[in-house]
């Protein structure tokens, strides 16, 4: 038999005694409790008060389920009167396990927040049988809709990335994030990606924090780079995100592959052409992950198209350069050597990429410094990728901030 004391432990609520338990319908239980704590603080003067003034209105708070029962805690909070203040005002006692005006216990609110990590509001609404409005209320009480600069001591790295909220590359939002004390945090979500808006946000960072910024990681979008340089000046290293760089040279390879496949379709026998099936995926896969079969297919393709072999090998060698633990100077020399090899190869597919490379040599080679000085770039990119899917379709700016915040901090919040 479970004792009253044991049951209180299971409820996890301090300063109460259980008066009675009532079942309601098939799956709801109401647990009536009373406060065992004495006194409180006057809401006007703040002094301790212990002059009893009866009990207040009954409140009913949803709590964590017990054995699958929807569980409510019902309490009539104690009231106290202040004898120091004029007109002797009364104050309702507040216990630690609920927030005034919330229809839930704090434990239940925490449970809702935990459920929201990696889930949408709709998912949680179904699972917990709780209206979306109630969930949004909890979200608003728990997660701010903007960063609190006062809580931040210094910002070493700032990351800028963009997310399309709708298909067709419209409705971009910009996510500004940072590593603060080894934790990824979101500093801001901007409703657009223009230079002016990014600039305005950077200027809203308090001066004391602006001075602490050492790196800004961004794609090669001129608006972002320009805004970072204008606000943080030359002192800050703007680093190109290597994944964005890789995307550019991989795209060049892809264009050549398509062109070559069209040529081979015309020139090769049907048998030979069909033997190149799946080559699209094989070219995209990292070389060291290819099976023996896939390598054979790749080699057959390259025998038919030496140009494609050259381009493929150039792509892989640039990836190796970016992977290597080089200093900025070493990285720059290696990349210049790579550019020379591309020029010597007479391949034209990289022409546009070479222009980008030459135009952004500083930002691209700053990546080598940035990586050495913080593990920021890699981790951020992966997290943002996952986020992109969940942010899709959220049009409310406040919700979006909370979404990103929760997904980046979620598990840390409850650790
Ligand atoms: Zn008072």
Image (spheres, rainbow, N blue to C red):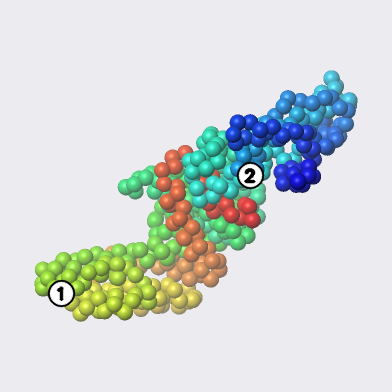
Q: Is residue 89 above or below residue 103?
A: above
Q: Earlier in the sequence, mark 2 or mark 1?
A: 2
345 vs 302, nearest the viewer: 302
Q: Which mark is residue 357?
A: none
User: Which residue lies under the disc numbered 1?
Assistant: 272
Residue at the spot x=40%, y=76% of the render? 320
For label 2, being within 8 Å of ligand 1 is answered: no
Q: Is residue 125 left or right of residue 361?
A: right
Residue at the spot x=41%, y=46% of the render? 392
- Residue 146 position, x and y percent, is 57, 44
* SS for callout 2: loop
Q: Is residue 321 visible?
A: yes
User: Which residue lies under the disc numbered 2?
Assistant: 67
Q: Is residue 389 above or below residue 135?
A: below
52 vs 412, nearest the viewer: 52
Are the residues flagged by discs 2 and 1 in contact, CB closer than 8 Å? no
Task: State the count of labels.
Answer: 2
- Residue 230 position, x and y percent, is 48, 54
Name the quadrant of the C terminus: bottom right
**In the image, which is nearer the foreground, mark 2 or mark 1?**
2
Q: Is residue 48 left or right of residue 405?
A: right
User: Where is residue 40, by image quadrant?
Assistant: top right
125 vs 383, nearest the viewer: 125
Residue at the spot x=63%, y=52% of the render? 414
* SS for callout 1: helix
- Residue 150 position, x and y percent, is 65, 48
């Amino acid at each position: 038999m479970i004792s009253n004391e044991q049951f209180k432990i299971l409820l996890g609520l301090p300063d109460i005694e259980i008066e009675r338990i009532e079942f309601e319908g098939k799956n709801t239980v109401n647990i009536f409790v009373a406060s065992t704590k004495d006194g409180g603080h006057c809401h006007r003067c703040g002094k301790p008060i212990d002059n009893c003034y009866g009990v207040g209105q009954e409140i009913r708070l949803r709590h964590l389920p017990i054995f699958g029962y929807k569980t409510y805690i019902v309490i009539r909070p104690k009231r106290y009167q202040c004898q120091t203040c004029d007109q002797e005002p009364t104050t309702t006692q507040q216990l630690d396990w609920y927030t005034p005006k919330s229809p839930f216990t704090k434990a239940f609110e925490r449970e809702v927040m935990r459920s929201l990590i990696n889930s949408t509001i709709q998912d949680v609404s179904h699972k917990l049988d709780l209206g979306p409005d109630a969930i949004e209320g909890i979200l608003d009480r728990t997660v701010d809709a903007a960063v609190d600069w006062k809580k931040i001591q210094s910002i070493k790295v700032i990351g800028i990335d963009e997310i399309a909220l709708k298909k067709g590359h419209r409705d971009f939002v910009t996510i500004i994030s940072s590593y603060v004390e080894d934790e990824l945090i979101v500093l801001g979500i901007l409703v657009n990606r223009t230079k002016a808006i990014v600039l305005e946000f950077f200027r809203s960072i308090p001066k004391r924090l602006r001075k602490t910024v050492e790196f800004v990681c961004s794609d090669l979008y001129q608006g972002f780079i320009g805004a970072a340089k204008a606000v943080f000046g030359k002192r800050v290293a703007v680093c190109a995100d290597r994944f964005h760089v890789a995307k550019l040279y991989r795209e060049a390879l892809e264009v050549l592959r398509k062109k070559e496949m069209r040529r081979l379709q015309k020139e090769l026998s049907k048998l030979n052409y069909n033997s190149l099936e799946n080559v699209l995926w094989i070219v995209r896969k990292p070389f060291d992950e290819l099976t023996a079969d896939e390598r054979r297919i790749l080699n057959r393709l390259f025998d038919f198209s030496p140009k494609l072999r050259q381009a493929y090998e150039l792509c892989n060698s640039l990836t190796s350069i970016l992977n290597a633990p080089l200093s900025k100077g070493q990285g720059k020399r290696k990349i210049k050597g790579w550019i020379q090899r591309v020029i010597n190869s007479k391949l034209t597919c990289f022409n546009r990429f070479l222009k980008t490379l030459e135009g952004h040599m500083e930002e691209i080679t700053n990546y080598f410094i940035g990586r050495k000085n913080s593990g920021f770039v890699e981790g951020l990119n992966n997290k943002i990728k996952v986020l992109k899917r969940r942010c899709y379709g959220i049009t409310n700016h406040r919700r979006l901030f909370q979404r990103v915040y929760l997904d980046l901090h979620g598990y840390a919040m409850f650790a």
